[in-house]
Amino acid sequence: MDDAEQTLSFRRLDHVLRALPDRELQGLIRRLGIRIDPQKRIDVPSQVARVLVGQPDVRDPSRLQHASRELLHRVAEAGGLLGSPALPAGIEPLMARGILFVRRGEDGESYEIVLPSAYLVQLPGWQGEDPRSMRALLAQAPFETISAVAAHYLGRPATPPIALALEPAWEVLTHADRLREEIEKLPLLERRLLEAIDGLGGEVETTELLDLEREPMRLRSAKGVTTTRRGAGFSLEKRALLIPIHPNRHVVPAEVSRIVGAERMRDLELRRAALRQEIVDDDHMPHRARFARDSAAFALAVTIAAREASGEVKPNVGTPKSLLVRIAQRFGRSPDAVGTISALSRAIGLWDAGATSVSTPPGSIAVGELGRVLFRTWLNGAVWDEARVEPELLRAMQDQRDPSPCNALRRIVIDALLDLREGGWIPYRSFERYVCEDPRGVGLERLFRRWSERVAIAEPPQIGDVVRRIVLESLAILGVVDIGEESRAGMGAVSATDGSGVRAADATTAIRLTQRGRELCLDLTLGGRPDAPGPNPGKFVDGHVLRVGSGSLVGHVLSLAPMVEIGRVEDALDLVLTPAAIAKAIGSGSLGDEIRERIELLATLPDSLSQILVQASIVVGKGTLVATGGFLWVEDADVRELLRTRRATADMFVDPSPPGGLLVAANVEPDRLVRRCRGLGVEVEATGDVMLRASRTMTPRPSAVVDSTARSGTRTVTPSRPMPARSKTPFPKTR
């Protein structure tokens, strides 16, 4: 067993519980109220594991607080094992429930957060995850399918809980070499069926599956035609190589498709070599060009602008169109560009309140790596969908729309960009023809047609239109391609067609894969590893202009957002620290030393700005914050002195009190205060818990009862006998 297999085996829930110290395991049992039966033949960790997988918090993460839910998604994106220099926010509730476990890293200083496989296979999908990944498909598969998968890899019938029985299957399905061995052991008929489904786009309906495997028997139910529990289709299903999802579809997971389609990709390379040679032989340099910019700086600027209007953005609700229009006008970008970056930024958690923490993503991501994370999220296909033309649905959340098969077309476009000239310009018209002639496009046309029927679109999108939006809009916004043009009139992202059906701008448009884009494509598609960004901290290019470096952390940049203004947004982000912005931050409650520490995390503080912070931090006076129960207005200074000095009422007030009255001490009952003051000849009127007015009287203390008016809430002192008229004799002054 290699290191990868040992790591996957350690992530089984019962193995994790056995590795816990006895004190922590017993504390978990007491905390959750788990009943241990000593008569059972299984040990204590196995009994605890059976109870833990039945918790509803994993199958329904909306029950958790926002920070815990986002942390759970980040650990799942890391494959169930996330390294962190410190314990992130939101981890305590998950550890208390036995969902996440923490162990020391190999260096002895960092932490490794472990999400057991039993939780990983049942966690619902979230925005930003590839909907065709093995984990996402297994999480939404029906019970009959996951039971058959668990029984196949266990070698015996699977018993509840199924999540624990799926752990051995998960170890095989997430290990590339063991999954390849499982595919190679398939019989010839099943292997051909799997290749045929992958050649049609990796997704078929039930009737198409039965036609491909030449199954004459048809079983009908209320949901339509269903597959039989025999044959090649069911054999692939129980191995998790073909997973059925609602409604009536069967999908090949992305991990399986990469292995099965490897040979077809080699044949494809030979078939398109002639067309590629035709494109790259000539020089197609345009007269004018619009060069792509790094998407990381723009994403940070949009996030800072959105945080200023935090009341307009609500979780699990689409981004307001009015906010996107304001941000587009502020930075001089198109609303489409702002909408794309906003959707991707929200998907990776940049807009969340916990993004300022540097102990977990996205706050722990370096600015130089942020563009790569945005590109990977876009490539997964669950956040932004170029097949849709309705902006409202593009801004909607993931669970409110059905994703199109655009993800597979993105892979074809990326492969085509890597195939063609490196660093050279190519005509877009030839590139589109190169993509559309890909044999995988035949299956995509059928998938787009089926998808348009499900979402009630009158006309299915054409492959060329979707490719145009991917290349000229999304990839240009993400900084992957440069766009050149021959005409001086400018070029729209999607232009109108002439009478021949050819777009006028396409014939004069050229594209070029940037060096940044090539590194991103190689890293995420072909397994390449670009060089990690070096230690490039920020610097002050002017006395008050801070240019964020690629080595800065996203959390440090966002923590500085309330006290800066946004400057230039090009390949780097400029933050302007004006005296007005610093004064506004101090006025809102930030301390001068706190502002200094946040700035020094990004760059060395210049002398001019340091002097401004020193002046802003000067203490001009001191105050004392005391707890009070109210304020008693007393206009007469002699009455104030009487109440403050007499033994009956002295302990009820804060000394010294401001002019015009007396501060009532905390936890003093109003009725008790009224009686004490009345005993000294001072009548007090009160509304609610706040004292309003006090007046003096020479009437001796009566036997009083407190009558509270229900509607007005005003307390008045009602004596047991009629009160005599007030004396006009002045009250003697205290000496």
Image: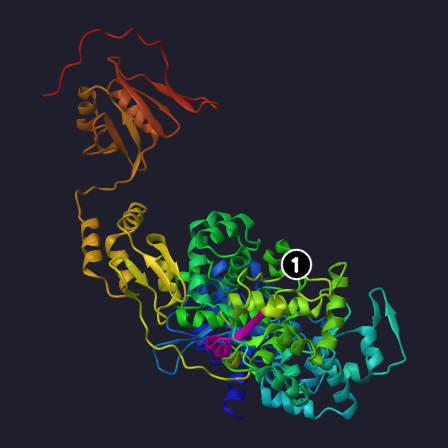
Judge whether 109 appears above or below 592 on screen. Answer: below
| Residue 583 position in % (x across, y down) | 27, 47
The answer to whether residue 133 shows anywhere in this view is: no
Residue 231 found in image quarter:
bottom right
Q: Residue at x 28, y 51 (%)?
A: 582
Q: Secondary structure at mark 1?
A: loop
Judge whether 364 appears above or below 170 on screen. Answer: above
Q: Residues within 10 Å of mark 1 (few under 14, many from 20)?
A: few
| Residue 670 position in % (x across, y down) | 34, 29
Q: Which residues are magenta?
A: 509-520
Q: Which residue is mark 1?
A: 389
**Coloring scheme used:** rainbow
Residue 685 falls inside the magenta stretch: no
Judge whether 613 appears above or below 549 on screen. Answer: above
| Residue 330 position in % (x across, y down) | 44, 51
* Image position of 648 (left or right of 358): left
